[in-house]
Image (cartoon, grey):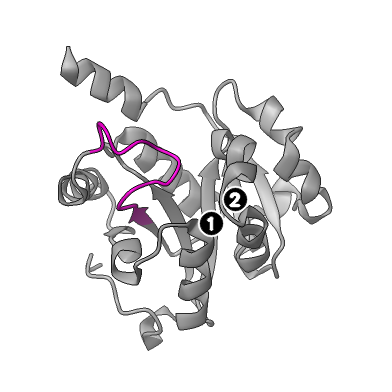
Amino acid sequence: MSKRLPPLGNALLRGRRIGLLGGSFNPAHEGHLYISRQALKRLGLDEVWWLVSPQNPLKPAAGMADLSDRLVSARGVAAADARIRVTDIEQRLGTRFTADTLHLMRKASPLTKFVWLMGADNLLQVSAWDRWTSIFTTVPVAVFARKSYDIRALSGIAAHRFGSARVPESRSRQLADAAPPAWVFVPCQHHPASATAIRRAVRH
């Protein structure tokens, strides 16, 4: 499969089930690859797109590698699986916030079945994101287990706010077809890779 990303709204994307994994990817690592493969398998997705953020609004610019370098890093890791595509969609759309990115992507490709992917660490703090509730009402959301975060995340603000929209794990493969709000918690092995640890090791 070609790694080239079809334009949003392209007929080739209609009906496809695509997971969206956003982040700084500073740098990309095996943990991102692991979660993407879990999403492909457990959610029955056709592809996973990595949305490499120009600058995460909640993270300091200091210590953030250039977008071009992070894209290269991500493409190197994603090369291990042809179903994973690395994108600079947020740079091209000119968006800073996930809510805006998802709104524009859905508007451009209304027949594409997008699913937002995130770890339990992000579920725990997603209520600090700009217009965070609109993320849940724009696309289905899949939350993957993260060591030491799961219990707190599942008892946190977002989990309570959308408690009635939680989908049983047994229906994970139908999540992409669900009308939002709909989200599922996916228990899986905790991968030890950490971008913070990688950067620390490089500095030393």
Q: Earlier in the sequence, mark 1 or mark 2?
A: 1
| Residue indicated by mark 2 | 142
Secondary element under disc 2, as helix, strand or loop, is strand
Query: In the image, what residue occupies the spot 35% across and 42% down?
Result: 33
> Residue 88: x, y in percent?
28, 61
Residue 39, how many percent across, how many down?
50, 50
Secondary structure at numbered mark 1:
strand
Task: Classify 10 Å Cα crowding around label 2: few (below 14), some (14-19), many (20 and above).
Answer: many
Q: Is residue 76 left or right of residue 5?
A: left
Is residue 109 shown to the viewer in this render? no
Is 64 above or below relative to 97?
Answer: above
Q: Say whether residue 42 is left or right of residue 67.
A: right
Disc on res. 201: none
Q: Amino acid at mark 2?
A: Ala
Q: Is residue 58 magenta?
A: yes
x and y, in percent, of residue 54 in the image: 30, 53
Point out the image quarter for the C terminus: top left
Q: Residues within 10 Å of mark 1 (few under 14, many from 20)?
A: many
Q: Quadrant of residue 195?
A: top left
**What count of labels does the image hold?**
2
* In this rendering, position of residue 68 left or right of residue 57: left
* Residue 185, quarter of the rendered image: top right
What amino acid type should be assigned to the residue bearing mark 1? Trp
**Start and end of the magenta stretch?**
50-64
Asked whether the beta carbons under mark 1 and mark 2 sit within 8 Å of each other, the answer is yes
Q: Which secondary structure dominates the residues rendered in magenta?
A: loop
Is 61 included in the stretch rendered in magenta? Answer: yes
Residue in front for this viewpoint, 72 or 63: 63
Q: Which residue is mark 1?
A: 116
User: Is residue 135 or residue 77 the one in the foreground?
Assistant: 135
Q: Residue drawn 35% across and 54% down?
A: 50
Q: Residue extending furthest top?
A: 204
